[in-house]
Structures are given as C-alpha cells and as structure tokens.
Image (spheres, rainbow, N blue to C red):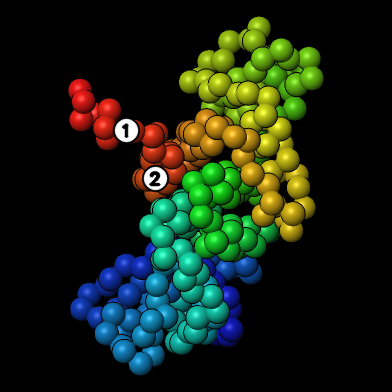
C-alpha cells in the first residue's frame, strides 16, 4: 500500500551506487523508516534542494519487495530549518537530535510525541544565539526523549535506599539512571548534581510542551547537565554518539583570554 503526504524528518542520507540515495526518516505515524530515492543524487528536477539532513518533508512513498524499505516517489519540503545552517553552532547542537532518533528508536514502530519534541527542539535551535540557549534546548530534548522512549531518570529519590530528594543534603547523578544520596555508593561513574540542575531536569520533563521554549539551564550548569545526559545516553544506546561529543565541545563557551594564556605558556 502506498503512503501519501506523510510528514517525515530527514535523519541521514547515504549515497547508493552512482545515482541513488538512501534516506533514514523519522515519521509520527510509523516511527523511523528507510526509503530509497531513485536518482536522488542526480535528479535535478524531482529532488533538487529537497533531500537534505534536518529537512521536514512531505513524502509520497511506495512499497518495495522488502517490508523495511520504501521507495520515495516524490517529496516536497515542509520546513528546511534553514536557521540551523546559518550558524555552525546551531547545526552542531542539532546533530544529536538527528543522531538519537537514528540510533535509539526502533524501525517502523511509532513513538508518541517524539517527532513533535524533535521539531520543537530544532525550531528553538534555529533561533538560538547563545551557547546557553542552544544547550538548554539540547538538554530538554535529551531528558524528554529518555522519558518518551522509556528510559526515564529517577529524580525523586535515591536509586538505592529510596531516600526522597527533599531529605538529601547533597546528591549525585549516576549512570544507573538517577539520583544517589550521600550515604549510598554511587557505583557507576558519578556526576555532581547541584540542586538547581535536578530542578531543571525535573521541570524539563514535566512542563507543558508549549512552555518549554522559555526554560533555560541555570547559569553555569550547562556543561554539567550535558555531560551527564550525554554519558547516560551513551549508556542507554550502548555505544559512542559522535554528534553529542561535537555538540558538547562547541557549546562550551570559550573562557576569556584562552588564546593569550596558551601563547604565554
Ligand atoms: Zn541512598
């Protein structure tokens, strides 16, 4: 059965042979799918300017002999997310959004809320002009995607003894999946977790989606938040996520006088 006018976010493009392209696309109704664009590398008319990473397309798809592969008959661009291409930091911050949908979602299984979250995140990043703004958008995406895919963090109580958050004087975040109180061994590599960061993560996962664009990371806590979330996501996915490393490096605000300091040494 053919599918018409299906919206999908382009996650990855791979050349196939001389003239074709394979697309990995995330859709609301079918989750992640793979489609073959015959002549996608060459065709100037049918796909010109259409097949690019992070484009939201409206696709017409036809089945192939393989149940996991579709043929892209035609497509048009619903949103190009052009703002991402105007600043390399925005593009780098958006990389993990595409990579995680590619690596952490199952093939052809719908995932409630995931496409909406990705699109809201990309729109915010398109306008983002500071590392903190981009880091906030990325951190919210990372923590909410954990919930949507069933890997939610435990931020209410100690993972080991159940002591509630309100009774902890200090706390750590661990790769076991949430908070550990000062009396319990952290086990896995642990991360410092200032109370402001825990509050941010709790609000980020519970806030109404429309209000999220105003939520920002507490001052100075972007690196800690992103380092923990990146580590935890690597644990969940089971391998490295190169785009997260790149995004983290680019979102670290350069300290003042760095180059002068290095030159002096
Ligand atoms: Zn404990």
Q: Secondary structure at mark 2?
A: helix
Q: Is label 1 within 8 A of ligand 1 (CB to nearest ligand atom)?
A: no
**Nearest to N terminus: mark 2 or mark 1:** 2
* Left or right of 120 on screen, residue 132: left
Question: Residue 113: image x %, image y %?
Answer: 67, 59
Tag in front: 2 or 1: 1
Compared with residue 26, is residue 70 higher up or lower down, i.e. above or below?
Answer: below
Q: Is residue 232 visible?
A: no
Q: x and y percent of residue 239 in the render?
A: 40, 39
Q: CA distance from mark 2 to mark 1?
A: 15 Å
- For mark 1, what is the residue? 258
Q: Is residue 105 visible?
A: yes
Quadrant of the frame with the N terminus: bottom right
Residue at 40% in and 76% down: 51
Q: Residue furthest bottom?
A: 45
Give the SS element for disc 1.
helix
Mark 1 burial class by Cα count in 10 Å: few <14, some 14-19, many 20+: few
Q: Say above or below: 61 vs 163.
A: below
Residue 202 tag number: none
Foreground of the two, 220 or 124: 220
Along the line of sight, which residue is nearer the eye, 196 or 163? 196
Question: Percent x, y for residue 101?
Answer: 51, 56
Where, quadrant-wise, is the C terminus in this rendering? top left
Instruction: Tell me which residue sits at (45%, 56%) in the image.
Output: 90
Q: Which residue is mark 2?
A: 250
Residue 24, compared with residue 214, is above or below; it is below
Residue at (36%, 68%) from the top-left corner?
A: 13
The furthest residue to the top: 183
For the point 20% across and 78% down, the residue is: 18
Q: How many marks?
A: 2
């Amino acid at each position: 059965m053919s599918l018409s006018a299906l919206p999908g976010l382009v996650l990855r493009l791979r050349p196939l042979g001389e003239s074709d392209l394979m697309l990995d696309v995330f859709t609301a109704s079918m989750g992640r799918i793979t489609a073959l664009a015959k002549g996608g590398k060459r065709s100037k008319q049918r796909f010109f300017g259409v097949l690019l990473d992070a484009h939201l397309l409206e696709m017409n798809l036809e089945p192939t002999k393989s149940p996991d592969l579709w043929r892209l008959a035609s497509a048009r661009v619903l949103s190009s997310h052009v703002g991402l291409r105007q600043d390399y930091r925005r593009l780098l911050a958006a990389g993990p959004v595409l990579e995680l949908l590619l690596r952490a979602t199952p093939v052809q299984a719908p995932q409630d809320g995931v496409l909406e979250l990705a699109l809201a995140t990309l729109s915010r990043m398109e306008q983002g002009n500071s590392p903190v703004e981009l880091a906030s958008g990325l951190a919210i995406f990372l923590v909410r995607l954990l919930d949507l895919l069933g890997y939610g963090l435990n931020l209410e109580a100690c993972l080991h003894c159940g002591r509630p958050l309100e009774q902890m004087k200090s706390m750590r975040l661990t790769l076991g999946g949430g908070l550990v109180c000062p009396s319990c061994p952290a086990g896995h590599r642990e991360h410092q977790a200032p109370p402001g960061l825990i509050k941010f993560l709790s609000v980020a996962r519970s806030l109404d989606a429309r209000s999220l664009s105003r939520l920002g990371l507490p001052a100075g806590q972007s690196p800690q938040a992103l380092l923990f979330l990146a580590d935890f996501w690597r644990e969940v996915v089971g391998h490295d996520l190169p785009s997260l490393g790149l995004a983290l490096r680019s979102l670290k605000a350069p300290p003042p006088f760095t180059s002068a300091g290095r030159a002096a040494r």
